[in-house]
Image (cartoon, helix red, strand yellow):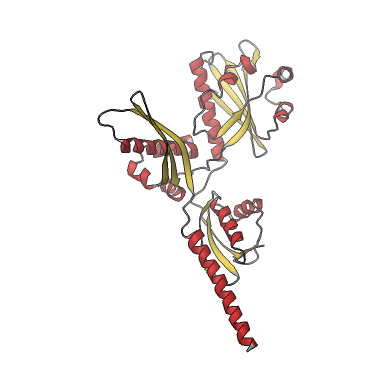
Amino acid sequence: MRFNIKLFNYKRLYIYFCFLALLNIFFSTENIQAKTFSINDVEISTPFEIDFDKNKIIDEGFVQAFDRLVLSILQTQDQTKLSKTPLGLIKSMIETFSVQEEKFIDEVYYLSLNVSFNKKKILNLMEEKNIFPSLPVEKKIFFLPIIVDKNKDEILIFSENYIYNNWNSNNQKYHLLKYILPTEDLDDFNLIKRYSKILESYNFSEIIKKYNFDEYIISIIFKENNSIKVLNKISFNQKEDLKNISFQNLNIDNYKEADKLIESLKSVYENYWKSKNEINTSVKTSLTVSINNNSNSEISKFEEILDNADLVYNYFIYKFNNKDSFYKIIFNGSPDHFLKYMKNKNYEFNIQNKIWSVK
């Protein structure tokens, strides 16, 4: 009799765990929306005329949102490959959209849209085009431009420097780098002047450390007649690279041409940052992971982390028992990269067996 009661209780316990696992499958995995690339504040305006068609304006907003996404995740050399993407294809990759604001002012219609693109479909399109996109990761970075005028044998710093004064005057919504320029400081001014003859080898650490930035760009712009040479000291992830760029027939005493230099340098820096966050969509590592299903909240937390992992292409529960849920995870990167990412999220794994188990 006692044996039958125990057996009955074990069956009830097993059914309970099965029920939890089924809830987890149906409500948190199968029905979850794919991760998205979100583009917000897409602004369109058009005269309000007799042939006014709101649907056409929204379609224009979709195209603008897609163009901005392309500009934010692709390096310059790849952006033109998607410049003629058909509207139908763009709309097929939209997960959701919402009208943020619409208004009429002086017979002009203004519309602001938020558009979310299905991440998996976007990445599949890039893979078809043999393009490696990048994660749209925004970054604040310390930026110091210095002009060395070889003709006049002088150095232009801070407010006497057009590049410094106008660097942040024409930022675009698709720019990922947000530049923090130094304040005009007499000590810094004197320091740069003191090292003016060896700027190429000077590390600028005395200035950089004041702003608590480990990542920075020091741009030393050598001007000689209409020839411009720029030495860039770029530090991302505690590694400094030197990047030399030359421009011919560019007179930066002319404001329009100086603005072209600013635009060109920003493009170089954006491409450089994107190269550090590139997704190789052709690499898809299949990982098998088990997690104890005693706690539904712990499973939900685990799935939330997978949802927010930009390099997780897909995941699903492929089996479960009364103890564990087993996940298949498709990852755009190496197993070591996955382990490093999850360790940063306080997850470690026993990897001795084919199926990795959460510790």
Camera-side residue of 64 and 99: 99
Residue 269, how many percent across, how many down?
56, 32
Camera-side residue of 98 and 185: 98
310, above or below 30, in the image = above
Camera-side residue of 324 and 333: 324
The residue positioned farthest toward the left in the image shown? 50
Residue 265, how many percent across, how many down?
54, 27
Residue 200, how many percent across, how many down?
67, 24
262, above or below 254, in the image = below
205, above or below 303, in the image = above
- Residue under the point 51% across and 20% down: 259
The residue positioned farthest toward the top in the image shown? 152
Residue 263, how many percent across, how many down?
51, 25
- Residue under the point 55% across and 67% down: 20
Residue 249 visible within the image: no
| Quadrant location, the N terminus | bottom right
Asked where in the image residue 338 lies, by quadrant, the reply is: bottom right
- Residue under the point 51% across and 26% down: 264
Q: Is residue 261 left or right of residue 96?
A: right
15, above or below 147, in the image = below
Q: How many marks?
A: 0
The residue positioned farthest toward the bottom in the image shown? 1
Q: Is residue 146 left or right of residue 86?
A: right
| Quadrant location, the C terminus | bottom right
Asked where in the image residue 324 lies, by quadrant, the reply is: bottom right
Residue 127 visible within the image: yes
